[in-house]
Image (tube, grey):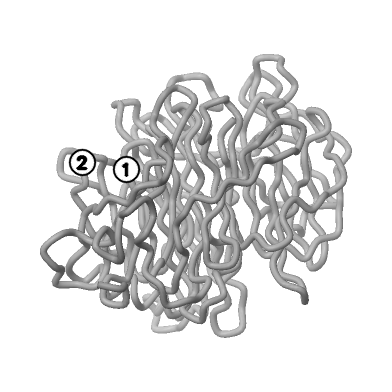
Amino acid sequence: MRPRELVFCVMIAGLCTACETSVRQLDAGPVAGGSGVGSPSGTGGAGGIGGTGGAAGAGGAGGAGGGTALCAPGGMPDPVGISSASLETSPVQLEAGPALTGAGVAAIMQARATGLVAMQWHRDGLIIVASGGFWDIGSGGSPAWMETSSMVTGAAAGDVDGDGDSDLMLLSTTIGEVNPDGTMSPIVTRLLVWERSAMGLVKRAELVKKDPGGIVGMPFAFADLEGDGDLDVVTFDLGGPVGHINDGKFAFSRKVIGATDAAYADRPAIALSVADRDEDGVKDLLVVLGGVSNFDNLVYPGDGTGGYMPHAPGTMYETTANGLTIGDVTGDGLDDIIEQQVEDDGPRLRLTASADWGTFAPTANIMQRGMGTDLVDIDHDGTLDIVTAIDERLFALVARGGGAFDTRDLGIIATTELLDLAAEGSPAGRPARLHLLYDCAAATP
């Protein structure tokens, strides 16, 4: 019951060019999805948590006190720090984490001004995507800034080469790229795979390049399509499933792996997940297609040979969602879709639950004021719970099955100093925790 995607659009030069996603670890146990972004205007970023306004510090949770637990002790040369909070204790306690220093801090603050910054959890630690690069923070707390010269807009983690660590797949966008012949491309989007080696992360392969063009969301996932023990990449393009087949040494070849449907050839995929939905032992593909005022959900059954059979009848529904997360929050083993919508009367969260392996129930409101989503199994019952921000506080919607939730106040203030939030936790026993990214210069001392 893993969270799959979190998506929200970012407007750059009037174009919707980039969307944030959760980092996923498909070969590990259920892990948490990444959250969206809070804005400095005080109205939480679309699809995200935090930035909901108010001047109070995030202290006061179980006696954590003011802003003392927000940033590393002893002061910081740069104004960004990470704290964490265990969800296994009540009341929640904030603990100081690593400090971020150097050029990457300026990138975070620049990204904050445009709404493009997100901290996400994978099995080995944290990834913070920002303008011009990303932070890689291992489980031991040692941060490393990786410069890309482009905006990293999506990420996924997986063991690509079978050596036991987490390699990365990163989606990035460049605005105004100069070509070798001197011409200018207005927008270029690339999907890159990075290897985690003894020397750190190293860029190894470019799988996709759209020039000119943007990719909305993160419609890419790791999956072992051939059953050879290494991870391939699956996506949806030109109306059908497409795989990028890995030779085990970071060389990928593009292959059509399912029937194409002309009716969806010009519809962009904004999110997808790979999981065994029909319980036949073969992983299936769920694709969410974007539109001006509606989404289409398509489920392609796996054929057992690394490809997909024709999709089940699609489920189309009207929506004005500007953010979504995919994960099982109903406890039936099937991924559901949680949307964030911003209406005239404020933000709300809506649930489109799986009815069976190939269809979905009608969309229903589950929270009138929720701003943004992140998923974590707080009570270790095997079903993901929802973390959201409501009126400057963080709450958990603890899943009770069948689309019912109990609301739990986490006792943490979501202020303008809170840049982003990521969650981790699994039924296998990993403690459920929140990680919070703070502007320490603005936090209450």
The residue sitting at 86% across, 54% down in the picture is 317
Residue situated furthest left in the rendering: 74
Q: Quadrant of the C terminus?
A: bottom left
Q: Pinpoint residue 103: horizontal percent, then vertical percent.
A: 21, 71
Q: Quadrant of residue 298?
A: top right
The residue wearing badge 2 is 140
Q: Amino acid at mark 2?
A: Gly
Q: Pinpoint residue 433: horizontal percent, then vertical percent.
A: 40, 42
The residue wearing badge 1 is 125
Q: Earlier in the sequence, mark 2 or mark 1?
A: 1
Q: Pinpoint residue 225: horizontal percent, then vertical percent.
A: 56, 27
| 157 to the left or right of 82 | right
Q: Amino acid at mark 1?
A: Gly
SS category of the residue bearing label 1? strand
| 57 to the left or right of 207 | left
Mark 2 burial class by Cα count in 10 Å: few <14, some 14-19, many 20+: few
Depth check: give the residue in front, 86 or 103.
86
Q: Is residue 213 visible?
A: no
SS category of the residue bearing label 2? loop
| 101 to the left or right of 212 | left
Asked if disc 2 and disc 1 are in contact, CB closer than 8 Å, the reply is yes
Vertical placement of 404 versus 126: above or below? above
Vertical placement of 186 versus 9: above or below? below
Q: Quadrant of the N terminus?
A: top right
Q: Is residue 354 visible?
A: yes
